[in-house]
Image (cartoon, rainbow, N blue to C red):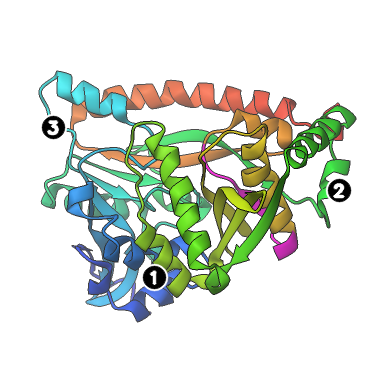
Amino acid sequence: MANPDSIEITLEPHPRITDIPKGDWQRLAGHTNPFLRYEFFQALEDSGCTTTATGWTPSHLVFRVNGEICGVAPAYLKSHSRGEYVFDWGWADAYERYGLPYYPKLLIAIPFTPSQGPRLLLAPWLRDELTAETLLSLLDNLTESLGAHSWHLLFPDSADQQLLAHPDELHRTGCQFHWHSHGYESFEDFLGALTSRKRKSIRKERRQVTGQGISFRWFHGRDIPDSVLSAFYVFYRATYLKRGQRPYLNQTFFEQLRENMPEHLHIVMALRDGDMIAGALFLSGVTTLYGRYWGCLEEYDHLHFETCYYQGIELALELGLSHFDAGAQGEHKLVRGFEPVITHSWHGIRHPAFREAIANFIDEEAEHVQAYYEEARTLLPFKQAE
């Protein structure tokens, strides 16, 4: 540990994850969170998913103290706001109306992944010594030197939130729905915690899926066959094409996950008459299952709920995980036992007038988010809510 009275902290961007020594990244990020793995970012870059051409120019951050690497963070210079799940399109439109550029912006986040977790991967002693004023000054100076107009840190965990908390910065909230195991040993245990009406409703949905001749099969890690991975990618791609969009990720990315992060990777396939008709991909950590991508070519009653949520709960229980983060959106998750969770983001806006306007917007939005969260709590389907 350096002497805190004599430390000199610098913050510098790197255009490729491989410019940062893998050992340093692993030392600071660990190996348990799939979205912080060195291999995850390398797969994104090597597959061409996060490049300047896609609007995701890697600019990964390195904190040095007296020349030694003591912190890292995944970061990108963005030329658009797609794939972030903290929506600032209205802010960009306002800038454009006044003839001002909103992009590029510096984004500290996991691409295409609205999951809370560590973002500032700091040595413990540095986290203890680093103040919000110093951190925000480093971020502001870096933003200016990169020619960006703002910085945005999305979905931080509680430790990062404490470090970011400062009255001069903009703190935004949102709401997601996550499933938590309250000591359940099986799906039936989970159903037993619900009200009778909701329990019957879920059982009916599951029966309707099997009544259409649909069954499910799980595949894990390197045991995922090429045929399954290729079929999954067709389904995933269809989800975007139906909305007239290009998919964010390509098949090469998923192949690299299977090769380099197999212990985290799971795919469930829905089968009918022996044919694969839908699929969903999940990543697992130490305590959390992350439901990330799904798709199908034809619609079947309740197939989405079964594939993405009920099968995910089954897998979480099988793996002994206490938390299932099934992604953004989803009031429909509430009646299926997913509980509301407040999410967070922090924003450094350089333009003073727009900073004030955005601050007012965020304050008003936060009141609505809190009211929405509290109302959602009253609608949970558990017995104690009756």
What range is drawn magenta here?
Answer: 318-328
What type is the residue that disc 3 sits on? Pro
For the residue labelled by badge 2, is the local secondary structure a helix, a strand or a loop?
Answer: helix
**CA gap, disc 2 and disc 1:** 37 Å
Mark 3 vs mark 2, foreground winner is 2
Residue hosting label 3: 101
For the residue labelled by badge 3, is the local secondary structure a helix, a strand or a loop?
Answer: loop
What type is the residue that disc 2 sits on? Glu
Residue hosting label 2: 188
Mark 3 vs mark 1, foreground winner is 1
**CA gap, disc 3 and disc 2:** 54 Å
Question: Which badge, 3 or 1, comes first in the chain's sequence?
Answer: 1
* Residue pictured at 51% horizontal, 22% vertical: 367
Left/right placement of residue 34 relative to residue 315 reads left
Q: In which quarter of the image is residue 289?
A: bottom right
Question: Looking at the picture, how far across and down is residue 15, in whole percent?
Answer: 19, 63
Residue hosting label 1: 39
* Residue pictured at 61% horizontal, 64% vertical: 219
Left/right placement of residue 189 relative to residue 125 reads right
What type is the residue that disc 1 sits on? Glu
Left/right placement of residue 362 relative to residue 328 reads left
Question: Looking at the picture, how far across and down is residue 174, in whole percent?
Answer: 49, 34
Callout 3 touching callout 1 (CB < 8 Å): no
Q: Please tell me which residue lies in front, 294 or 133.
A: 294
Callout 3 touching callout 2 (CB < 8 Å): no
For the residue labelled by badge 1, is the local secondary structure a helix, a strand or a loop?
Answer: helix
**CA gap, disc 3 and disc 1:** 34 Å
Question: Looking at the picture, how far across and down is residue 1, in whole percent?
Answer: 38, 79
